């Protein structure tokens, strides 16, 4: 506004001064013409008098003419040499002496006495501007001197131009005074509130909702400031409410994440860790480390960093493909996924074995965290699943399938071979040979039956079937077990016996399940004991190690052998399904389910099974059973 005012005032002032100058130029031109005409008129009348040297008549004529007009300031007559001999308002002294001062007129350099036209000039004097007219005096073609006439400017034009100039200056000064006052008012009443509002808006945008503006203003600006303060107050309350809700939701989320069995890591688009649950800390060995806000790639195990760096940056850059929900995950024979920029899709998983902090196999799932409208990626959710047990079970299951296939194929082949021989050559065989073939087929059938029964037993124990527990006499269970394996032990040259405490109390349990436990343990003992060895079943009463005030009495059952023993590394996995010690020695038969069935049955009796073994010395299994109480 000030700039516009300056431009307008300058333009108007310029126009005004141009008009004043035009008026003054017109006045000067008028004065020039008037002086020229007046000088020619005076010269025509004064030249004869000067030629006759009639100074008295010249004086009367000049005085009469000087008094008749106010435009003439002076009249001066000078001879050929420029000596002034008469002038108004001053003149030459009448009495000449040696002390008399002679006055001369200084003619302009451009004055020519031979010109027929007067020489005119304008100059500024202390009393104002004057138009000088120099007219040559000629009489009968004789140059007599010069007449100098001073013409005053037109008073009307002077007054008009002066008034216009003064008014213009006054208007210009008034405009700028108003502009300055307007700027001061604007700065105090408009600019300052607007600046305060601008600062307040920036603070609000920076989430500083405590911002307030305190200016005593009325009108529209006052209403605007009041509205701004009301808005800031509402935003502050809304922020506090949102913070409380977000805090509660965050607490719920952290509680939920901390309780899930899988590891969970949430990272932003700069690979900084935003959230991590205790499971992930334990898997990656991050306990006691503050890695929130740190780059996750700097803390992951090396093999995992190499595997995940490229896919993570692809997800952040949104250069990945969305995998259909029904598409199955693919893996190679080593259960490790390899991904390229063209093949990686959201939903793919990474499987690899970590050696630190402990050796384990993990499955990594990467999921995009999108913003509200699913237009951009806000972060990445990394799910870490410990599948060590799953991998081990898969390996054991594969081994089991291989073993079962072998175990099924061998007896079936033998049964088929002997039956075909009996069918085709039965008449040519002796009765002893026929009986031998039938016994062999019957033995192989028993092998198939045991294999199928083991699988069915394990499946039945894993199911939700409930068993009715009651009073069980362990003496009967032990004796039935010994009768079952008496002949087998005799054939192998192994001594089998029992050591049962007198007056052994009955226990709380299931007869058939306990019989199966002792059968499996004794069978294993006979299988891993060489000829001349011994397998013994012991049972005696003990006091349990319960933390209760009154310990519960129990009966401890032990099955000890003097067999080959179990390697320390095998003892940790001996009760796992499908695991067989003979997998390492490759000499004995079995499915690897016997001890797993034993552990499952003992678990159902609310107890645990233990072992002590030395290689080349023997192995002892034992477990406790609660004494039956009414």
Image (spheres, rainbow, N blue to C red):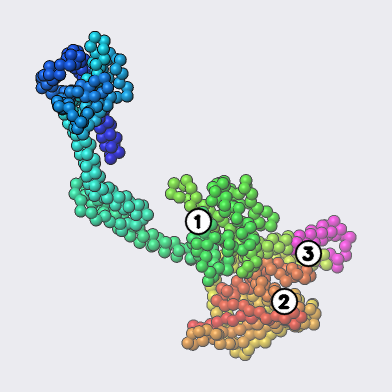
Above/below status of 610 relative to 594: below
Q: Main secondary structure of the magenta part?
A: helix
Magenta extent: 406-435
Q: Magenta stretch: residue 430 in it?
A: yes
Estimate the x, y position of residue 543 in percent, counting from the top left.
56, 87
Q: Name the residue under label 1.
A: 268
Q: Residue 259 carries which label?
A: none
Q: Which residue is drawn at the image coordinates 55% and 76% (left, top)?
A: 606
In this figure, which residue is indicated by the disc labeled 2? 566
Q: Is residue 316 above or below residue 287?
A: above
Residue 578: x percent and y percent? Answer: 68, 66
Q: What element carries label 2?
A: loop
Give the residue drawn at x 70%, y 65%: 451
Using the rendered view, name the quadrant where residue 67 is placed. Answer: top left
Can residue 21 be seen here? The reply is no
Residue pointed to by mark 3: 441
- Residue 106 vertical position relative to residue 139 in the rendered view, above or below: below
- Which dot, 3 or 1, sits closer to the camera? 1
Looking at the image, the residue that sits furthest to the right is 428
Q: Mark 2, mark 1: which one is toward the viewer? A: 1
């Amino acid at each position: 506004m000030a700039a516009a005012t300056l431009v307008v005032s300058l333009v108007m002032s310029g126009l005004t001064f141009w008009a004043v100058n035009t008026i003054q130029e017109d006045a000067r031109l008028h004065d020039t013409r008037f002086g020229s005409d007046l000088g020619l008129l005076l010269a025509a009348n004064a030249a004869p008098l000067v030629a006759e040297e009639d100074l008295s008549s010249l004086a009367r004529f000049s005085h009469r003419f000087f008094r008749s007009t106010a435009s003439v300031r002076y009249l001066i007559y000078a001879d050929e040499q420029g000596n002034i001999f008469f002038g108004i308002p001053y003149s030459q002294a009448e009495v000449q002496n040696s002390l008399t001062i002679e006055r001369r007129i200084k003619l302009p350099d451009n004055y020519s006495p031979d010109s027929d036209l007067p020489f005119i000039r304008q100059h500024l004097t202390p009393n104002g501007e004057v138009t000088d007219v120099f007219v040559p005096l000629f009489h009968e073609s004789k140059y007599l001197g010069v007449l100098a006439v001073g013409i005053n400017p037109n008073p009307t034009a002077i007054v008009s131009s002066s008034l216009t100039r003064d008014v213009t200056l006054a208007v210009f000064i008034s405009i700028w005074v108003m502009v300055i006052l307007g700027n001061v008012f604007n700065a105090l009443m408009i600019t300052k509130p607007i600046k305060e509002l601008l600062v307040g808006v920036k603070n609000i945008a920076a989430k500083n909702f405590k911002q307030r503006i305190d200016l005593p203003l009325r009108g529209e600006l006052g209403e605007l400031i009041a509205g701004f303060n009301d808005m800031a107050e509402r935003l502050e309350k809304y922020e506090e409410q949102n913070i409380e809700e977000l805090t509660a939701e965050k607490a719920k989320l952290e509680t939920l994440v901390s309780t899930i069995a899988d590891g969970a890591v949430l990272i932003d688009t700069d690979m900084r860790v935003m959230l991590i649950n205790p499971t992930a800390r334990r898997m990656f060995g991050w306990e006691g480390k503050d890695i929130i806000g740190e780059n996750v790639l700097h803390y992951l195990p090396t093999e995992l960093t190499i595997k995940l760096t490229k896919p993570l940056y692809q997800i952040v850059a949104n250069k990945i493909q969305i995998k259909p929900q029904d598409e199955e995950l693919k893996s190679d024979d080593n259960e490790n996924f390899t991904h390229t920029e063209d093949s990686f899709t959201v939903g793919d998983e990474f499987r690899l074995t970590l050696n630190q902090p402990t050796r384990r196999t993990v499955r990594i799932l990467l999921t995009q965290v999108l913003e509200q409208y699913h237009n951009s990626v806000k972060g990445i959710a990394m799910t870490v699943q410990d599948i060590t047990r799953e991998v081990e079970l898969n390996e054991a299951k594969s081994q089991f399938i291989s073993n079962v296939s072998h175990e099924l194929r061998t007896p079936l082949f033998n049964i088929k071979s002997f039956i075909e021989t009996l069918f085709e050559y039965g008449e040519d065989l002796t009765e002893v040979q026929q009986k031998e073939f039938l016994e062999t087929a019957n033995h192989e059938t028993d092998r198939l039956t045991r294999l199928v029964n083991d699988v069915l037993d394990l499946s039945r124990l894993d199911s939700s079937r409930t068993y009715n527990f009651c009073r069980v006499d362990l003496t009967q269970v032990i004796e039935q077990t010994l009768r079952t394996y008496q002949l087998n032990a005799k054939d192998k040259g192994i001594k089998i016996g029992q050591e049962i405490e007198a007056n052994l109390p009955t226990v709380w349990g299931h007869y058939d399940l306990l019989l199966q436990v002792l059968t499996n343990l004794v069978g294993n003992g006979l299988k891993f004991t060489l000829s001349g060895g011994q397998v013994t079943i012991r049972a005696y009463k003990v006091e349990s190690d319960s933390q209760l005030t009154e310990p519960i009495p129990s009966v401890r059952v032990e099955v000890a052998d003097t067999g080959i023993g179990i390697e320390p590394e095998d003892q940790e996995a001996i009760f796992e399904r499908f695991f067989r010690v003979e997998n390492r020695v490759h000499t004995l038969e079995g499915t690897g389910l016997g001890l797993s069935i034993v552990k499952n049955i003992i678990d159902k009796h609310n107890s645990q099974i233990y072992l002590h073994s030395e290689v080349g010395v023997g192995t002892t299994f034992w477990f406790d059973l609660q004494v039956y109480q009414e």
